[in-house]
Image: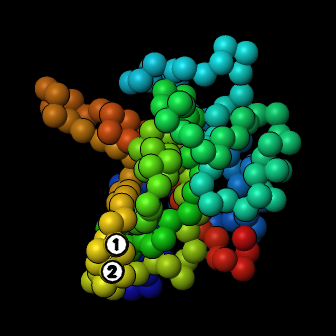
Amino acid sequence: MDPIERFKQMAKVSSTTVVELEKESDVIDYLKSIEPEEKKPIVPDKREPQLDKKILGTWNIAEELIEKIQQDNDFWVVKNSFRQYLGGLDFGLFWADFAVANTGTLIVKSFSEDLRILTMFSEINVVFLNPEDIVLDFEECAQDLNNYLSGGGFVSFITGPSRTADIERVLTLGVHGPWEVHVVLLSQEQA
């Protein structure tokens, strides 16, 4: 089976939304189209009271796109020091390094605490993924991950929104990570 189609299929099973956009800047309209449900945050929201915009954390995103997003009145863009926004990161926007088609899993490598915070504490993850970086199974990227981890790096495996049912067997979303995950398929040439 085609890895891209298999990834889309398995991502859907894990409640991940997958879209294909023509160019990176189209993500602004896509972000505006996402209407997050009103949820009570686990960590208290510490944003400034006068800030009525959605807080968008970005990592390794082209400055040109960040400038376009900042010109939009709907978003407040934060590029680092995410620890101070633990209870208020509405969106996290970043690139995945790989995806595993058979499980619908995104793989994000990092040495940065900021990226780890962004992947875990954003209410909605919007993740760019180059379709060429989709592998069929973990065996295809195992050597790369072993090499990376031997250098002390961190790897985040994201397979859909966070979910747990360990409290009275009631399914709860967003306790250990994002409430929603959106994958934007975009080749490096389109970025």
Tell me where residue 142 sits by quadrant. bottom left
Give percent across and percent down for residue 62. 73, 62
Count the numbered circles shown.
2
Q: Which mark is residue 12?
A: none
Q: Residue at x 66, y 77 (%)?
A: 188
Q: Nearer the viewer, residue 191 or 143?
A: 143
* On screen, residue 35 above or below 59: above
Q: In the rendered structure, which amino acid carries the disc numbered 1? A: Gly
* On screen, residue 120 above or below 21: above
Residue 60 visible at all: yes
Binning the other alpha carbons within 10 Å of mark 2 as few (below 14), some (14 to 19) or many (20 upward) gives: few
Give percent across and percent down for residue 114. 50, 48
Binning the other alpha carbons within 10 Å of mark 1 as few (below 14), some (14 to 19) or many (20 upward) gives: few
Local secondary structure at mark 2: helix
Tell me where residue 117 sits by quadrant. top left
Residue for badge 2: 147
* On screen, residue 53 above or below 145: above
Residue for badge 1: 151
Local secondary structure at mark 1: loop
Give percent across and percent down for residue 95. 56, 63
* On screen, residue 96 above or below 158: below
* Quarter in which the C terminus is drawn: bottom right
